[in-house]
Image (cartoon, rainbow, N blue to C red):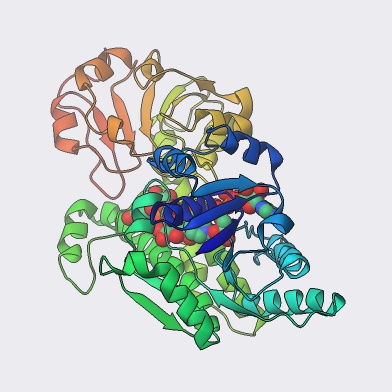
Amino acid sequence: MKIAVIGTGYVGLVTGACFAEVGIDVTCVDIDAKKIASLEQGVIPIYEPGLNEIVSRNVSKNRLSFSTELAKVIPGCDVVFIAVGTPPGEDGSADLKYVLAVAREIGRSMCDYLVVVTKSTVPVGTAKKVKSSIEEELKLRDSTLTFDIASNPEFLKEGAAIEDFLKPDRIIIGVESEEAEDVMRKLYKPFLLNGHPIIFMDVPSAEMTKYAANSMLATKISFMNDIANLCEIMGADVNMVRRGIGSDSRIGNKFIYPGIGYGGSCFPKDVKALIKTAAEHGYDMQVLKSVESVNEFQKSVMFNKIKRHFNGELSGKVVALWGLSFKPKTDDMREAPSLVIIEKLLEAGAQVKAYDPVAMKEAQHIIGDRIEYVHDEYEALIDADALMVVTEWPEFRSPNFQVVGKLLKNKVIFDGRNIYDAKELQELGFAYQGIGVHEVVPIIETTN
Ligand SMILES: NC(=O)c1ccc[n+]([C@@H]2O[C@H](COP(=O)([O-])OP(=O)(O)OC[C@H]3O[C@@H](n4cnc5c(N)ncnc54)[C@H](O)[C@@H]3O)[C@@H](O)[C@H]2O)c1
Ligand SMILES: O=c1ccn([C@@H]2O[C@H](COP(=O)(O)OP(=O)(O)O[C@H]3O[C@H](CO)[C@@H](O)[C@H](O)[C@H]3O)[C@@H](O)[C@H]2O)c(=O)[nH]1
């Protein structure tokens, strides 16, 4: 089988590399010539664990190649995946201009039966628009060529993208014809051999499944953040409550970790887009609106705590930030809660010294030199008045607290991810504040 994947971002590149890994002949296409040149030289433009290895292995086996020329790649392909971005437009709706531009190009260049698959996250009705765009182009060519559309939303998580793609919980495919179903089943057969379920459905349901899944996960997070804030007021410990409710199999223990709000390129944009889609059809998504407002509030929680700790005066204070990316194991800074926290700290007159294992370059593109970037987590602490943990990178989980205490001016930790044990830190002489847990003040001296 021969396939093309259009768009070589997080989703397109992972999709292409993983299909090549099971023996399929894949060409990844992008309009960004710099990106393609870099990939051809073996340089992966994003940080994603394992991606480098899987790409180079499949390139060397001649199963994976790159191109900027969609028109040359399409002829001879059995399936084309559209995996370009669908960023939020000004009104929050998904901007489909990249998806539909690709659809038109496919219509202009196809020369045999083809299954055109939307892998990008797109609102219900988009596959239909893709179909119309291709039909219009074929008509302009006086062509009688036939094709099918399919919707195959992607559920991978950044930082675990390869694993998620190769071992998916489920594969969702929306189709309109038996022929397309057969092609898609054949394409995904290598994944099904490992027992991963494939669920075929109609196209609108497949498109909606993606938004419903992300919205449900975002809802779990906002709900837990709300509970965490209430725990704090009522003197309960959200870590205990989380374990207590997570052991109920109807609730489950995943995606119920409170923190500083969800970020990334998906939850914020997809929740917004679903609210917008509903509004356009006269329906009010009340739950999701609250999910959004809790999330906005949550991004300020740690800032409010640090401000209170220093009696409302942050001017001249130096804050060490551990982590910048929206989650560990990625350099993606899209909608990272760190951006909100940094703006608030700078506005209040504080200085910020930040360390992130991989996202500092990306962060610098967005924030510039308004904060200081340092070489490791301990350097960030030198002369800092407080430490704030923003991203739960594994290397931050068990630091040498003796060294942390010596380097900080004040032994104060604000833990936005609840990765530390309040009691242990208290015994070591730290003041500690997490999310939805008791604030502790040190048993022994705070300052060095
Ligand atoms: N990032 C994720 O974790 C994730 C997971 C599941 C689904 N999604 C969805 O998948 C889609 C892609 O997301 P992403 O994060 O990979 O985006 P991205 O921004 O990382 O990559 C998109 C790529 O598409 C390319 N592109 C744009 N127009 C093009 C065209 N006409 N021809 C060829 N290439 C073109 C861009 O140059 C870019 O390289 C979005 O709809 C997103 O919501 C993302
Ligand atoms: O219990 C939790 C779990 C996650 N988060 C936050 O939620 C955000 C998103 O995390 P995650 O879902 O792990 O990362 P993404 O790569 O954004 O993946 C989501 O978005 C993708 C794009 O649509 C989907 O494909 C995935 O299934 C979906 O998990 C991050 O800011 C996390 O810190 C929490 O605060 N608490």
* Vertical position of residue 138 compared to residue 294: above or below: below
Q: Answer with the quarter of the image where residue 411 lies.
A: top left
* Vertical position of residue 372 compared to residue 176: above or below: above
Residue at the location (40% across, 68% down)? 188
Residue at the location (52% across, 84% down)? 179
Quick one: quadrant of the C terminus? top left
* Vertical position of residue 287 compared to residue 314: above or below: below
Q: Residue 446 location, x and y as percent?
A: 24, 20
Q: Is residue 234 left or right of residue 372?
A: left
Ligand 2 in which quarter: bottom left
81 and 389: which is toward the camera: 81
Residue at the location (42% across, 75% down)? 185
Residue at the location (26% across, 30% down)? 431
Q: Is residue 267 left or right of residue 370?
A: left
Q: Residue 121 location, x and y as percent?
A: 55, 65
The answer to whether residue 287 shows anywhere in this view is no
Q: Residue 310 location, x and y as percent?
A: 41, 29
Q: Residue 193 location, x and y as percent?
A: 28, 68
364 and 168: which is toward the camera: 168
80 and 312: which is toward the camera: 80
The answer to whether residue 318 shows anywhere in this view is yes
Q: How many labels does the image show?
A: 0
